[in-house]
Image (cartoon, rainbow, N blue to C red):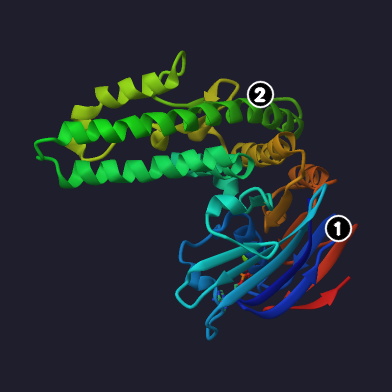
Amino acid sequence: MKIIGLTLSNFRNYESQQVNFDGGLNVLYGKNASGKTNMLESVYVCSLLRSPRTTKDKELIRMGASRAKVALTVEKKFRKHTILLLIDEVGKKKVAIDGIPVTRAGELLGVLGVVFFSPDELKLVKESPAERRGFLDVGLSQQQKSYFTALQKYNKTLKQKNNLLKESKHADNLDDMLDVWDIGLAEHGATIIRKRMEYVNELNKFASQSHRKISSGKENLMLSYETAVKTEGDIRRNLEDALLASRAKDKELGYSTVGPHRDDIKIEIDGIDARRFASQGQQRTIALAMKLGEVEMYKQETGETPVLLLDDVLSELDKTRRDILLEATKGVQTILTCTEFDGDGAKLFEVKEGKIINKQ
Ligand SMILES: Nc1ncnc2c1ncn2[C@@H]1O[C@H](COP(=O)(O)OP(=O)(O)OP(=O)(O)O)[C@@H](O)[C@H]1O
Ligand SMILES: [Mg+2]
């Protein structure tokens, strides 16, 4: 798929800007703080209904303005869609797809697929498990609405259960209430675990291939889903058992200690845990391979190419890795930001103080 047009009104430091992107490589270049990342952010919000860098949507409204607006047209294999996003005075988001208001976040998912890559993602290997779970959640939610729904329900139930464990420790009917929440957690949690396992197994094929290429065939990457829940047999039943087994401990601690909200991606190079032992260069190579894998997973699952958003990553990579990344952008619409770009075959946009001042 391709984004054809993007219009920003009072979004971050843009007062009013319209851009027509090319179907191939688009480069936003310009000085620091000019608005390059802001533009990628506006695209990301149209895809996932949240910013990759803030949870406070009000920050997206240009200072001094009361509302922000983003209009984006995306061309897919069989049809075009227009996404209109409005952030109102109190920071509440409203979305319309092809002029029809959307009431739930899930309805927007899948309309515009993006893979976002920034220097933060380069740290994916050394970050906390939460970051790696986030990687899975974003990838899977964009491909499968049923995953997003299960995740939403799971998180809501988990919050309610944790509140109970914290606030009502001494209630007489505590166990009865916990039983109820555990039924929900086991149902939705099993869906999440099953889908994440499938995703990681497939991702591993693509990522290990890219990884071999980047490391010149010297190292073998192995990704697998790491969970304390037994994955043989009926996962839902196993999760139910695990929840019950940890109940005494959970009551004592005041929160729920087993389930997909505690899981991780295990990352090994030649059998050694890369999360703990990989060098900086190795970590970058793995992160790059995982992100390229995310692109391939999206293609495989949806039959469409996602839009690749590359925020300032070229400067962080050496030539071999840079070339492999640029190679992978062939046939994928890419919007890339940098302070200077010396490659060719790209449509160039110079950004200055919230405006595009030059196009080539
Ligand atoms: N709500 C807002 N209203 C007005 N300006 C904003 C708002 N939010 C952020 N900005 C401004 O946008 C600028 C940052 O833009 P952005 O992060 O896109 O820069 P960049 O071009 O990616 O820079 P770098 O090369 O350093 O990454 C900052 O100067 C910031 O003050
Ligand atoms: Mg930036």
Residue pointed to by mark 2: 220
Q: Amino acid at mark 1?
A: Gly
**Residue where numbered disc 1 is placed:** 343
Q: Which mark is first along the chain, 1 or 2?
A: 2
121 over 208 or under it: above or below: below
Q: How many marks?
A: 2
Classify residue 246 by image quadrant. top left
Quick one: which residue is furthest to the bottom in this view?
64
CA–CA distance in space, label 2 to label 1: 31 Å
Q: Which mark is residue 115?
A: none
Near-viewer residue (292 or 154): 154
Classify the position of the C terminus by image quarter: bottom right
Ligand 1 in which quarter: bottom right
- Foreground residue among 316 and 259: 259
Residue displayed at 41% across by 18% down? 230
Residue lying furthest front:
100
